[in-house]
Image (spheres, rainbow, N blue to C red):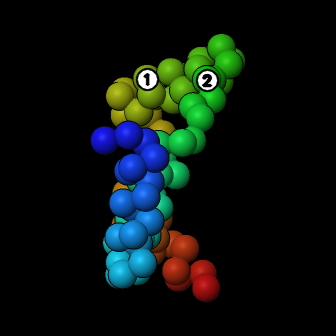
Amino acid sequence: MSNQELKEKIAICMEDAEDHILEAVLTLLMASTQKIIPLTEEQMKIVEERHADYLAGRGEYSTWEEVKARITSKQ
């Protein structure tokens, strides 16, 4: 199927699609079109240092649930 045919079929399906389906399609399309920006050498060094600290058990880290709890408790 050509690119144009796919776009036409998608457009037809979108007319009756439920919101959650449209949101999922939009998320997929946005993710696939974002450009990946490479890290500079300095940024990569920072990432590697932080990763080494994490593997060595140094530093304080939080789970996503802990972060959400901190954020919502301040509101």
Q: Residue drawn 44% across and 65% down?
A: 11
**25 to 52, vertically: above or below:** below
Q: Quadrant of the C terminus?
A: bottom right
Contact between labelled residues 1 and 2, with CB atoms less than 8 Å apart = no
Residue 56 picture location, percent across and down = 37, 27
Q: Tally the numbered discs.
A: 2
Left or right of 66: which side holds 48?
right
Residue 24 picture location, percent across and down = 38, 65
Q: Residue furthest top?
A: 41
Q: Residue drawn 43% across and 58% down?
A: 8
The answer to whether residue 66 is seen in the rendering is: no
Q: Amino acid at mark 1?
A: Ala
Residue 31 picture location, percent across and down = 48, 47
Crowdedness of circle 1 by 10 Å Cα count: few (<14), some, many (20+)? few
- Which residue occupies the foreground of this view, 53 or 26? 26
Q: SS for tag 2?
A: loop
Residue 75: assigned label: none
Q: Residue furthest left?
A: 1
Crowdedness of circle 2 by 10 Å Cα count: few (<14), some, many (20+)? few
Residue 44 picture location, percent across and down = 59, 20
Q: Residue drawn 60% across and 81% down?
A: 74
**Dot in front, 2 or 1:** 2
- Which residue occupies the foreground of this view, 35 or 63? 35
- Which residue occupies the foreground of this view, 31 or 21? 21
Q: From the image, tell me which residue sits under label 1.
A: 52
**7 to 46, vertically: above or below:** below
Left or right of 59: which side holds 63?
left
Q: Earlier in the sequence, mark 2 or mark 1?
A: 2
Q: From the image, tell me which residue sits under label 2.
A: 38
